[in-house]
Amino acid sequence: MKKINIICAGKLKEKFFKDAFLEYEKRLSRFCKLNVVEVNDYPDDMNSIEKEATLMLPYLKNFSISLDINGKNLSSEEFSSSIDKAFITNSEVNFFIGGSHGLSNEIKQKSNLNLSFGKLTYPHQLMRVMLVEQIYRAFSITTNTKYHK
């Protein structure tokens, strides 16, 4: 079975974010195994990006996608195709979401794809929900199910 890993700084704290995430996690279970790795975040530390990167770097393997405001903008169909192609040669796809200060340049440079959800800034808890929804949408596009319109 295909495996998606989401490596992120911080935890989902708000119940409504947790509930939304769990709903998409449940929906995804028919397409892949979803694994979430939550590393410590350091929102008030000037060296937060480097500290979080140290915890995330061991997961930088297989096909890795970093969420980056300056990354590539893809349509849902293009995103779906990217994931589908990544699974041709990889059993796992890893997504990286940084903390409040973003991701380290090292993680972004070593990733196979830097992905942007637009120029707007989102809270990283909301970004995690948006990402898992787009992953679910990507699988529904690939499998031609009716979720994607």
Image: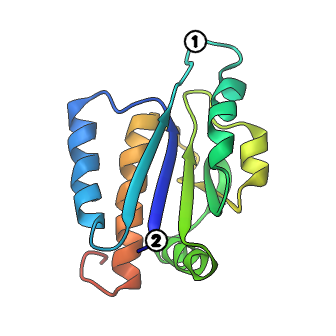
Which residue is found at the position 40% from the left and 62% from the top?
134
Dot 1 falls on a residue whose secondary structure is: loop
Q: In the displayed image of the protein, which residue is found farthest to the bottom?
A: 144
Q: Is residue 134 toward the left or the right of residue 55 in the image?
A: left
Which residue is found at the position 25% from the left and 75% from the top?
147
Q: Work out whether 28 lies above or below 132.
A: below
Question: Can you tell which of label 1 and label 2 is closer to the viewer?
Answer: 1
**Which residue type does callout 2 highlight?**
Ser
Q: Quadrant of the N terminus?
A: bottom left
Total marks shown come to 2
Dot 2: within a 10 Å radius of its alpha carbon, few (fewer than 14), some, or many (20 or more) residues? some
The percent coordinates of residue 122 (x first, y second) are 47, 38
**Which residue type does callout 1 highlight?**
Asp
Residue that label 2 marks: 76
In which quadrant of the rendered view does residue 71 lie? bottom right
Q: Is residue 118 toward the left or the right of residue 12 in the image?
A: right
Residue that label 1 marks: 44
The percent coordinates of residue 105 (x first, y second) are 77, 40
Which residue is found at the position 78% from the left and 42% from the top?
106
